[in-house]
């Protein structure tokens, strides 16, 4: 199993990055406590409606519990939350103890803004999709300087040592007694944080604290963590980010050095059965009931590829990596990165091997699932090839990170004689379905 583009030119991505950076860091309020346009108020300034209790607990495991056990666990957390949280005017106050204030609703891509005020020696944070955390603590507490407290709040403190985002880029905390303003933009696992209008985290991947070998969930609760001292919150607003905006945000970061390999008009620079494909509104689309592998006339060694992909229900295609120009794409090249509707089994009433799921090195290494945009919407994918190492990031979440040189077991025992190739063509391996590709960019190392 194998219209004119908004981001076709890298300079456009640079412009978008500049526009995003220049945008107001916190939406302006129409009146105190009112949600800005497009935002929803998470705290109603009356009671704890919309919140349940929570803890440092793997959200996937919570969802996997039998319904009665899950309800009992949430009820236990909520009881301790209500004992330690209160409402004072327009402020949500915690005394430094008890369960976390966790949204009843799960969120995926979003923009979150809030204000907080805390006290010396307090330690808190904001969990995203149930994962710890955007750190909030006392930046003057010398006993925690060895942990990074002197660097300030706003970092993704539970990322691995040295990982991007773990430490804030600048110290931006205000003195105790003053309100701090936080803005968080999250697309996939990519997180950007501004503290008091200063960027402290720049588009860093939030690691899965509960299992660093797997990505964070596609959705989960927002949690206001508590321990160690009083903290007050107000003006807590959230705006959900749709697929189109998410793709624009992803495309606006790290676009330096990319060049288009498809002109959006014809198949100049491409070879193979191009008559089996068609150009539709600036995209390459496999024609229904046709297929075969089309590929670039230029060869590539190590590279990063960016491409947007749109699926029909059950859609199946593939990215040919180091393809030699003939033969079965999945086996004769280094690999075929699977392109497949994440709901393929339901759409086709059939089963697949995990190594056939979208983003997998077909037949060799399985990718994580559950990170597609809805059918009919474009997905943003970035594929990095360095020697035998392949990484696939889908919609801001790394779903595959593998080394093909270490693979010794193959689906159905079928060998992949080309897996050690270090050069070849890039292309699309169509399989009868009208899967579409656009904004196809390449950067060589």
Image (cartoon, rainbow, N blue to C red):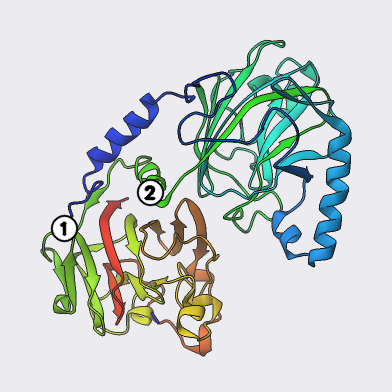
Which mark identifies residue 264? 1
Q: Position of residue 213 (x, y in %)?
A: 63, 58
Instruction: State which quarter of the image contains the N terminus.
Output: bottom left
Q: Residues within 10 Å of mark 2 (few under 14, many from 20)?
A: many
Which mark identifies residue 249? none
The answer to whether residue 363 is visible is no
Q: Residues within 10 Å of mark 1 (few under 14, many from 20)?
A: many
Q: Position of residue 221 (x, y in %)?
A: 66, 47
Left or right of residue 194: residue 287 = left
Which one is in front, 79 or 167?
79
- Residue drawn at x 35%, y 58% is 378
Which image quarter: residue 422? bottom left
Q: Position of residue 88 (x, y in %)?
A: 77, 21
Per the image, label 2 sits on a secondary structure element best described as helix
Which image quarter: residue 125? top right
Left or right of residue 427: residue 388 = right
For marks 1 and 2, the one nearer the N-term is 2
- Residue drawn at x 61%, y 55% is 217
- Residue drawn at x 89%, y 34% is 83
Residue position for label 2: 247
In the image, is residue 406 above or below residue 59? below
Q: Position of residue 54 (x, y in %)?
A: 78, 45
- Residue drawn at x 49%, y 73% is 343
Which image quarter: residue 279? bottom left
The answer to whether residue 194 is visible is yes
Per the image, label 1 sits on a secondary structure element best described as loop
């Amino acid at each position: 199993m194998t219209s004119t583009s908004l981001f076709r030119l890298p300079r456009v991505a640079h412009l978008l990055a500049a526009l995003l950076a220049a945008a107001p860091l916190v939406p302006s309020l129409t009146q105190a406590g009112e949600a800005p346009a497009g935002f929803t108020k998470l705290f109603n300034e009356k009671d704890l409606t919309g919140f349940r209790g929570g803890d440092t607990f793997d959200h996937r495991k919570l969802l996997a519990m039998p319904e009665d056990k899950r309800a009992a666990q949430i009820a236990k957390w909520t009881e301790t939350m209500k004992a330690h949280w209160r409402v004072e005017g327009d402020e949500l106050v915690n005394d430094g103890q008890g369960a976390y204030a966790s949204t009843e609703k799960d969120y995926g891509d979003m923009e979150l803004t809030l204000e907080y005020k805390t006290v010396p020696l307090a330690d808190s944070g904001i969990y995203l999709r149930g994962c710890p955390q955007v750190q909030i603590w006392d930046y003057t507490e010398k006993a925690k300087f060895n942990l990074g407290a002197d660097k300030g709040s706003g970092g993704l403190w539970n990322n691995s040592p040295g990982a991007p985002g773990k430490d804030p880029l600048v110290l931006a905390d205000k003195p105790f007694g003053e309100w701090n303003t936080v803005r968080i933009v999250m697309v996939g696992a990519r997180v950007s944080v501004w503290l008091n209008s200063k960027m402290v985290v720049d588009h860093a991947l939030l690691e899965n604290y509960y299992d660093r070998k797997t990505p964070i969930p596609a959705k989960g609760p927002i949690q206001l963590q508590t321990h160690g001292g009083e903290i007050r919150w107000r003006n807590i607003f959230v705006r959900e980010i749709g697929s189109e905006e998410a793709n624009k945000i992803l495309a606006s970061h790290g676009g330096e050095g990319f060049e288009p390999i498809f002109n959006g008009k014809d198949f100049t620079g491409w070879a193979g059965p191009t008559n089996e494909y068609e150009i539709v509104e600036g995209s390459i689309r496999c024609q229904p009931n046709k297929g075969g592998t089309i590929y670039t006339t230029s060869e590539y060694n190590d590279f990063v590829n960016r491409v947007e992909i749109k699926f029909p229900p059950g859609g199946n295609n593939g990215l040919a990596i180091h393809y030699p120009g003939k033969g079965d794409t999945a086996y004769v090249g280094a690999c075929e990165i699977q392109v497949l509707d994440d709901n393929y089994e339901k759409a086709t009433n059939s089963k697949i091997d995990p190594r056939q799921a979208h983003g997998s090195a077909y037949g060799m290494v399985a990718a994580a699932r559950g990170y597609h945009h809805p059918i009919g919407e474009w997905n943003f994918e970035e594929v990095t090839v360095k020697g035998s190492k392949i990484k696939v990031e889908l919609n801001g979440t790394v779903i595959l990170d593998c080394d093909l040189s270490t693979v010794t077991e193959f689906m159905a025992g079928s060998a992949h004689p080309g897996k050690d190739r270090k050069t070849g063509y890039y292309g699309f391996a169509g399989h009868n379905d009208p899967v579409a590709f656009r904004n196809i960019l390449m950067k060589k190392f």
